Image: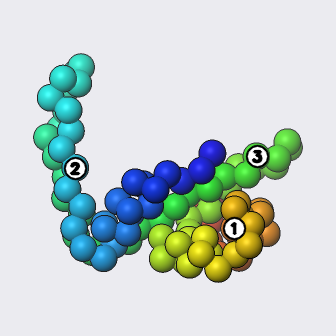
Amino acid sequence: MQVKEHQQYALWRAKHARLIHKLSDSAIGFLPFDMFVLVKSDAFVGICFYKKNRKLQLLLIDIDDFLEAKTTRPRKSLTEQEAYALAKHIVTL
């Protein structure tokens, strides 16, 4: 699965400017708030590689590093080795 252009833009805005997101009023159930605003926050792309008999790890790649890799690499997708090299945080799930 790829990171869509609008998702990349939203992550970039959350890190470098301001991202405002209004939640739908038609949602079923209790919502603790109606909207949220992120201003100059950390922003990451999360990637998991599934391997049988191995604990699942979430690789968190800073949006700026992700965008730079996207524009400087000849391949369209990241390899597992490249993702591990770019990851700022690794979370075992």
Which of the two discs, 2 and 3, sits closer to the camera? 2
- Residue at far right of view: 53
Q: CA distance from mark 2 to mark 3?
A: 31 Å
Residue at numbered disc 3: 50
Q: Quadrant of residue 70?
A: bottom right
Badge 3 density bin: few <14, some 14–19, many ≥20, Cα 10 Å: few
Which of the two discs, 1 and 3, sits closer to the camera? 1
Residue at numbered disc 1: 83
Mark 1 touches mark 3? (CB < 8 Å) = no
Q: Nearer the viewer, residue 12 or 32?
A: 12
Tell which circle, 2 or 3, labels the residue nearer the N-terminal end.
2
Q: CA distance from mark 1 to mark 3?
A: 13 Å
Residue at numbered disc 2: 21
* Amino acid of disc 1: Ala
Question: What residue is at 74 percent from the left and 72 percent from the top?
Answer: 74
In the rendered view, does 44 fall on the left or right side of 54? Answer: left
Q: Is residue 88 visible from the viewing direction of this image?
A: no
Question: What residue is at 18 percent from the left and 44 percent from the top?
Answer: 22
Badge 2 density bin: few <14, some 14–19, many ≥20, Cα 10 Å: few
Mark 2 touches mark 3? (CB < 8 Å) = no
* Amino acid of disc 2: His
Tell which circle, 2 or 1, labels the residue nearer the N-terminal end.
2
Question: What residue is at 35 percent from the left and 59 percent from the top?
Answer: 10
As helix, strand or loop, the secondary structure at mark 3 comes to loop
Question: Does 60 sit above or below residue 23?
Answer: below
Residue 60 percent across, percent down from the top left: 56, 65
Q: Nearer the viewer, residue 54 or 4?
A: 4
